[in-house]
Image (cartoon, coloured by chain):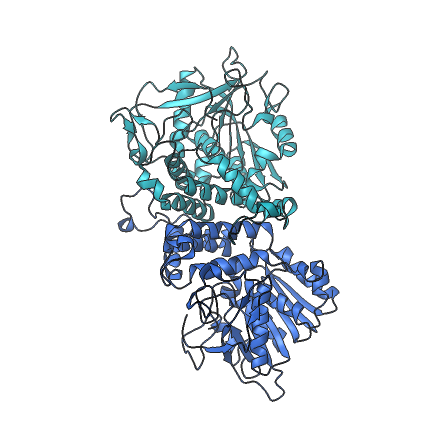
Chain colours: A cyan, B blue
Amino acid sequence: MGGARNIFTLPRPMRMYRGGCLSRVDVAYETWGELNEARDNAILLFTGLSPSAHAAASQLDPSPGWWEEMIGKDHPIDTRRYFLICVNSLGSCFGSTGPASIDPDTGKPYRLDFPVLSLEDLARSARELLRGLGIEKLSAVMGASMGGMTALAFAVKFPAMAESVVSISGAARALPFAIALRSLQREIIRSDLAWNQGDYPLGAGPIRGMQLARKLGMITYRSSKEWQMRFGRERVAEERKTGDAFAIDFEVESYMEAHARKFTGQFDPNCYLYLSRAMDLFDLGDHGGSVPAALAKVKARRALVIGVETDFLFPLFQQQEIATDLEAAGLDVTFAGLDSLQGHDAFLVDMDNFRPLIGEFLS
Amino acid sequence: MGGARNIFTLPRPMRMYRGGCLSRVDVAYETWGELNEARDNAILLFTGLSPSAHAAASQLDPSPGWWEEMIGKDHPIDTRRYFLICVNSLGSCFGSTGPASIDPDTGKPYRLDFPVLSLEDLARSARELLRGLGIEKLSAVMGASMGGMTALAFAVKFPAMAESVVSISGAARALPFAIALRSLQREIIRSDLAWNQGDYPLGAGPIRGMQLARKLGMITYRSSKEWQMRFGRERVAEERKTGDAFAIDFEVESYMEAHARKFTGQFDPNCYLYLSRAMDLFDLGDHGGSVPAALAKVKARRALVIGVETDFLFPLFQQQEIATDLEAAGLDVTFAGLDSLQGHDAFLVDMDNFRPLIGEFLS
């Protein structure tokens, strides 16, 4: 996940949306395909909370990426036609500047001295990267989950840049159910004594807290129905059981444990806290008085809005609202409410549904 | 919650459903109304995971109970007609024997030496209480949430005892989504160092872990829609904010914190772990090969099965299955799928919907 990637360093300090300033900002990114002569075939892709910029295998890093099946020759995001740029979010820990980065003013990691992070800052830092790459017009800005929110923020803040907008299981603003879940995840991490008010050895820290927060994430990223079909009431094999009455007993517990262990250690806990909070704080209504007023600013020509019926974290009605508001803003909107079983994570898993939708929109 | 109540001590040791034995079993209970001469007007009420037997104000304890609006003269459970018995679950900590009780064989609290607890044991201990009270026939056995599961276990294990069965937002067996959530709650509690492998000073222990587990419970007990209407993106007043970037900011966070603080300290953490695990282990299919085969044993005449559309912890399709299976067993079944906003907790809150349904069924 932390493999090779390009780093763009902003030419000047960046003032943050909710106050404070970063004197040096690095944005890690990867690209696929070629920028055409008109410099207008680029697609900007924002990620969810946890992935790096490594969306697919590339010359820099041949390992498979998090959206491997979506990107490449003859893939929905066809790299013979488009120049795809995926950025590691500002505030993350895979090359971009974040709470785990060294503050050049002190020579020490920012940790909790990092300024309040907003999704508007993620959009802004990507805008600066595009400027650095000599790109003033995008064919599309795109993202799923937190990336969908950030893509909308980008489209509102830089309304004339993108020809089209693709929002997948995103949100125009955080709602209290999702805020409550993320707040609890953050509290679980902060309750791990190893968090130590953010002052842990980088690469270590609140492992247990991160695992528990990850498990809560997993529960909210998939659907009850999918788990019923996959796990039912299957038990783990007898020999894997211990004498502990509260040890893992059901397959679903074993699955969560295995995935939580894979995740932790990779992602810096303070970065997680900042990005999670940035999602709660996000409200497009801050840009114009209401969400519809904010989305009315978008000057793109077309939009694709995708939601999933079984997604209870970013529910379908939120996707429908985005589509309605963009339509009211005059965009040609394609809306798809998919019946995928995989809930919020469907865009990573249910490729049979997602590939044709995105492929057709971009073709 | 731990107010006055009656205690029935089983006349002999009780063998547990999944092995082990309790040499002394107390069952705490409260009653309302009078047992008639025929001794056939009793209703047995099982509770959810956390309440005591104090379902309503009584002569023993005039403080309001957890189902106050449902019980009394001219109330849906009319105490002029019925003799209502509410039991504190075996394994709980409000008078009934549980992990926080003294093991008479050692003179010390059971803690994790308490045998594996099953909902079948809760049903069985209540059966013994009824025998002690001289009751061989119930007008109804009833419960909501874990109490609904236990009422079904009772109806299957003692098929001829109850004339009718009332199952509210219950389950015939635990499904993986609910298992995953409860497993995570238990892990959060066990990860609190103050849990100390179950060996904490009774009345103290893993307060923080219990609060976090409670918050997760609250998120799953209500609905996203309700919280959107109640809290939206409201912020706490500025003066309540602190310098901590991750402190409470949104009203929904403040609400969860206040409720979590009220809950903890009352409920013993080991008891919580045992009861939570008992729900995961529950599968009526253990009694006859499948859930329908188990429910086919029920000899009651009528059943009322209630579920709530916004309940994603005990989803409506589970309630529908219970109703279908009881109907196939020859019972006269009333099924209600309510559109209450309050999710799993609706039976405690949405009295306008629940009162008439239960009142009519019992009248």
Tell which of A105 and B108 is nearer to you. B108
Number of numbered discs visible in the structure rendering? 0
Quadrant position of residue B304:
bottom right
Quadrant position of residue B260:
bottom left
Q: In the rendered image of this protein, does residue A46 appear above or below residue B251?
A: above
Image position, residue A109 (x, y; %):
30, 29
Residue farthest bottom in this picture: B37
Q: Is residue B145 visible?
A: no
Image position, residue B284 (x, y; %):
65, 61
Tell which of B123 and B147 is nearer to you. B123
Q: Is residue B330 visible?
A: yes
The C terminus of chain A sits in image quarter: top right
Image position, residue A228 (x, y; %):
63, 48
Residue under the point 32% across and 34% down: A111
Tell which of A283 and A1 is nearer to you. A1
Residue farthest top in this picture: A37
Image position, residue A317 (x, y; %):
54, 45
Residue under the point 65% across and 75% down: B162
